[in-house]
Every structure is written in structure tokens, then in C-alpha cells.
Image (cartoon, rainbow, N blue to C red):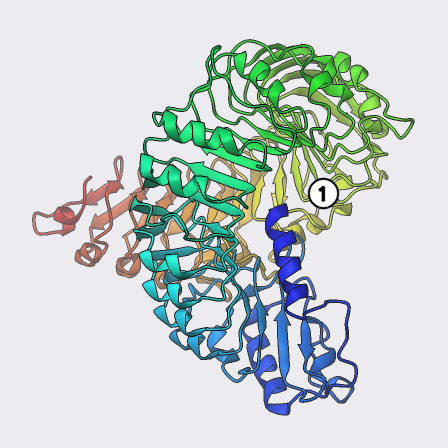
Amino acid sequence: MEQQLSFASMLMNFSGFNGSSKSAEAKCVERERQTLLNFKQGLIDASGMLSSWRDDDNNKDCCKWKGIECNNKTGHIDMLDLRGSEKHYLTGAINLTSLIDLQNMEHLDLSSNYDSSEMQIPEHIGSFKNLRYLNLSYIGLSGRIPYELGNLSKLEYLDLKANFLDGAIPSQLGNLTTLRYLDLSYNSEIEGQIPYQFRNLSQLQYLDLEGTYLSGAIPFKIGNLPILHTLMLGQDLDVKSMDTAWLSSLYSLTHLGLDSINNLGSSQHLLLTISKFFPNLRELSLTDRSFIVSSTSTVNSSSSLDTLHLSFNLLKSSVIFHWLFNFTNLRRLHLVANLLEGSIPDGFGKIMNYLEDLVISSNRLQGEIPASLGNICTLQRLYLKKNNLSGEISSLIKKFSWCNKTGMLPNLSNLDLSFNRLTGEIPKSIGLLYELESLHLEENYLEGDIIESHLTNLTKLEELDLTGNLLSLKFGNTWVPSFQLYVLGLASCKLGPSFPSWIQTQSHLQFLDISDAGIDDFVPDWFWNKLQSIYAMNMSYNNLKGTIPNLPIKLTMNYEISVFLNSNQLEGEIPTFLSQVSILDLSENKISDLNAFFCGKGATANMLILDLSSNQIMGKLPDCWEHHNSLKVLDLSNNRLSGKIPESMDTLVNLKSLVLRNNSLIGELPLTLKNCTSLVTFDCSCTSLLFEANSSLGSFKE
């Protein structure tokens, strides 16, 4: 990512784009201003990215709007840059077609936003003849890559990474002879072969096709892509011995990734070729299930290599750690999902003392975490999750060094030791890791109390997960944390009996798990407003009481929202605002009424899974199922429902599982249920429903 951004910055500067320069004298063209306002109409701007895009007398000049740059002489829009981030992004319908009037645009960046309309790249994208920079990565694009992109003869930068694009790469992209940067990675449905026309891309410096489903031979020969410095290939491409000659000719190559390549591990000739690059390479990524390092493996040492990814291999022996001593200047090391056993050598941190990222998750490592890791003062991210590491966590934290009197591991922002066998109490000195943004210690054997002083100094904390430990959180009722969390996981910790009032201060929560936390209290009304930003909430297995208020809440998240409130004492009606979530589990409560939820004003068709089993629901089944035709799973078992199944249930055309057992339903199954052609499971045992031979039984399994 760092390489990608630095190259993009270079290209923007080369192209004459400078984010610090303002088009103060430019007056935007009225037609183009209206185009921007029309584009804005389909968007949801929860974070205020477009707050300056206003249609009033004080904002007539769109050249002064955020993300816009205009030509100083003509007033035409040159740049539209609405790149999102983790905290600030647009949702809704990102309508590229509505931008058709911006024919003078040279730079378009809509990356890292979230389109919810299953948008495809329109064919008229080829009409933006002046485009030199196009970034549509991470926005949820679907469909094929249109061949019309090959008409953008001035294009130098094209990034379509991490979407849902499918089909073959159009050969017309080989017409983009000015292209310097091409990233189609992580579109897993892109298939076929690399077009041989890519040989024409003589100016290409960056090519990333990792995470696609491309197959077949690599079409390049000696002399092709002569100034390439970054090459990332993956999946089912077939590397043959002849390809090593081409690789050997890439004298500018500094970043190489060969992930899940056929024959990678067995091609010693290829590995020797790669070895020759080590004196020049800065980044190397090799993931292949047959790639191993043995005690006899030899390799040229390298002082230039700063990033090494050997994840998803068959590395087993701890010999790998000694092999890594050939690369003492490494800054990033990833060994995820191998078969590593034994312990991390005690001296590892003393030799590898320039590391910024150390990621050895999902292995079989044992023993204590060596104290020498605490000597790596440059360390920013340490991920050791899902191993069998043991020892007292207090002993580990105490071994973290003070670095040049600037603090204890002064650069550490992410610490993940989850799913190990760590024991003991978390020391208050963990609060000396002042730069921590993410702390994951879930699923260990930690115990003791967590009080305010543990966390007070962690002002940058955004993720905290202590789930699955024997910890008690003892905070005062008036405590106001110094941080704002996005992720909070405290499942199976002791929070209760009172509802934790300090959560009210957390206005950015997106993930919350306080299940099985010993809470025996009423849920305060303010809490339900948190659902406007949360995508996953779990408060099951407590003793939550009272009713859920029917608040006029509109959920702004544009992806699946999960809410688990099962195994509590909640009662009364289900408010209609909860129909906006995708997965709702209210089983094992005291809910008594369905009608407002299913038939009330504001009911929506977003729900996929609904579990209301084991409640106290009485009366007839609602007769307004047309509002919920997205349902796939519906469980109303173990209630007190009576009467007949209404014919409107035939509108549940996506339903796969319907469970009605242990109620008092009567009558015949409606013939219209045969319209529910997706139904696989229908459980109505212990009811008085009648099945006729000519009913819809043939359409599903009982």
C-alpha cells in the first residue's frame, strides 16, 4: 500500500496535480456545477465530505468545493478527487454516468467509498478522452471491464483494485501505451489469460494482478515492460522456466509478488532467479503451498529488502527464523498461516531490530513471547494471534523496553495477541503504550480487574477486544474515556450488573459485543441510537429488561447489519426500526407482539434472517409479509401463535427455512406456499396444520 501511494503521488505531481494549489481565480462552468450537484443527489454523506457542495449564493463557484480543481483559464473541472478513508467515506449510488459532462476532466478518484447500487463501469467511460488518472478501487464495482477503457489514450494511472469485477481482461487495455500504473488485483472473478497485447505497455512501471483468477502462460518476453519496478502476479498463472529469462531482464524490479503461482515451489530455476534479485529487491511476496525453507536453504543476504511476505506456505520448522537473519534490515515481515512450530528464538528481536510490522498469526508457535521483541523500538504492528503462546502477560509487558527516553515501544499502534494461552493480570503499565490504536487480547486466560487507569492514557485507542477472558471491568458511572472506539469486544467479561453508562460517550462504535457480560438492568433509551452507526451488535446472554422503544431511527449503514439480543428478558413489541437490520435474533425473550414490527409504518425489506423463537408471542400470524420478501430464514417456534397461515406468506419467495413448530396453528397449508420455490426446510411439528396430497409439499422438504 505504501508503494502504491508513493507511486500515485509521484504520478500526480508529474501530471501537474497538486493538492495544495487552489484554483482561487477559476469560476466553474454552470453546466458542470449542475453535474456535480446531480452526482451528489444519489450519495449518502454521513461524514460530511461534501459539506461544501451547496447550491446557494455563497457557493456558486464549484472550483472552491472540496475535492474539485479547475483549469485557471477555462474554469473547466480538471480534477474530481473524493477518495474515502476508514472514517470518512460516501455511500449510496456512485453514478459515473451522471459525470458525462465533465469532458475536460484529467483526474478522477472515487476510491474507498461504498456503492450500494451494484454499479458497473459504464461503456461511455471511454468518452473521457482527457483522463490521465482513474482510481475506482474499493467501491464495489461489478460486471465486466468495458473495452472502451482502451480509448483513453492519455491514461497513465488505472486502479480498479478490490471490486467485484468479472470476466476477461479486455485486450484493448493494451492500447494504453502511456500507462505507467495498472492495478486489477483482488477481483476474484476476473478470469482468462493475461492479454498478450500487454506487451505494448512499454511505459508500465507498476502491474498488480494478484488475487484474480487468471490462468495460463505469462505472455511476456525479453524486452517487454522494460522499466517495470513492481510486478504482482497470482492464482493459477503457470510460471515456466522460460519466464525466468524475462524476469532476469527486469533490471528495475524492486517489488515482486508471486502468490499461488503454479509450480512456484518446485521451480528451483525460478527461485534461483529470484535469489539473484535479492540485492536489489525491496519487497518480495511468495505464497505457495509447496514453498518451503529447509536447514540447507541458502540465499544471498540482502540489505535492501524491507518487506517479505511468506504467508500461506508450508513453512514448519523454526529454521525459518534463522534463515531470516539474512535480511537484517527488514521493516515488514508476514508469516501468516504457515505450520510454524516451536518457539520464537530469544535473540530474534535483537537481530531484526528495524521491524515495523511483525505478523506471525495462525501458526503453531509455543512457549513464551521472547523479551527481545520488546527491544524493537521501531515496531508499529505486532500480530501473534492464533498460536499456542503462553506466559504471564504482566511479565511480557514489563519486558517492553523504554526507547531513548521517548516511551515504551513508542511507535506501537497495533497489538494483537488474541487466541493464545496467555495468563495472569493485565498490568497498568499497558497504559504506557501511548500510541496504541488497536488492542486485541481476546480468547486467552487473563483474569483480574480492569480499572480506569489501565486505559486513561490510551487516547488514540480505536479497537479494544478483551472477549473470552475472566476480566472484571470496574469503571465509575461518570467515567468519560479519553478515546473514541470503533470496535469494542467485552463478551464474557464482567461488566454488570448495571448497564455500562460509559458506552454513551462512544459516538463512533461500529462493532459492539457485550454478550454474556453479567448485565442485569434495563437498556437505556440513548443506547438504541447507537445502531445508526453499528454494523454488528451482540448483547445476548445477559438479563436485559424492559421494552425496546420505537424510535424514528434511520440506519445509515449500507451493508448487512447484525443484531443479537437473544437470551434476555426483553418484552413487548418489536419496534419497526429493527426491520432495517439484516440479521435479528431476539429468541428466548418475552416478546409478545409481532404486528407493529411486520405491518407497522416504516417496515422495510432489508431483513435476511429473523429468529423470534421461544418468546411469548400470541395471536395470529401477521398478514403483511410482502414487506419482508427478502427473508431467507424465519423461526417463530415455541410461541403461542394460533390461527391459520396467511396466504400473503407466498410473497416470501427467497425463504429457505421456515420453522413454526410448537405453536397452536391450525388449518390447511395455503396452496400459494408453492410460490416459495427456495424453501428447503419447513418445520411445523407439534402444530395442528393439515397437509393435503395436492398441497405444496412437493415444493420443499418437511
Q: Is residue 510 above or below residue 78?
A: above
Q: In the displayed image of the protein, which residue is found farthest to the left? A: 693
Which quadrant of the figure has residue 117?
Answer: bottom left
Which quadrant of the figure has residue 536?
Answer: top right
Q: Is residue 294 above or below residue 247?
A: above
Residue nearest the observer in this picture, 9 or 500: 9
Q: Report helix, strand or loop for mark 1.
A: loop
Residue at horizontal 56 percent and vertical 56 percent from the top: 557
Residue 169: percent from the left, percent from the top? 34, 58
Residue at horizontal 43 percent and vertical 41 percent from the top: 247
How many marks the image carries: the answer is 1
Residue nearest the observer in this picture, 364 or 600: 364
Residue nearest the observer in this picture, 558 or 287: 287
Q: Is residue 75 above or below residue 366?
A: below
Q: Label 1 belongs to which residue?
A: 485
Residue nearest the observer in this picture, 310 or 654: 310
Q: Residues within 10 Å of mark 1 (few under 14, many from 20)?
A: many
**In this rendering, position of residue 509 left or right of residue 651:** right
Residue at horizontal 56 percent and vertical 17 percent from the top: 323
**In this rendering, position of residue 621 left or right of residue 275:** left
| Residue 26 is at least partly visible in this image | yes
Quarter of the C terminus within the rendering: top left
| Residue 551 is at least partly visible in this image | no
Q: In the displayed image of the protein, which residue is found farthest to the right? A: 405
Residue 407: percent from the left, percent from the top? 87, 28
Residue at horizontal 32 percent and vertical 50 percent from the top: 219
Residue 182: percent from the left, percent from the top? 48, 57
Q: Amino acid at mark 1?
A: Leu
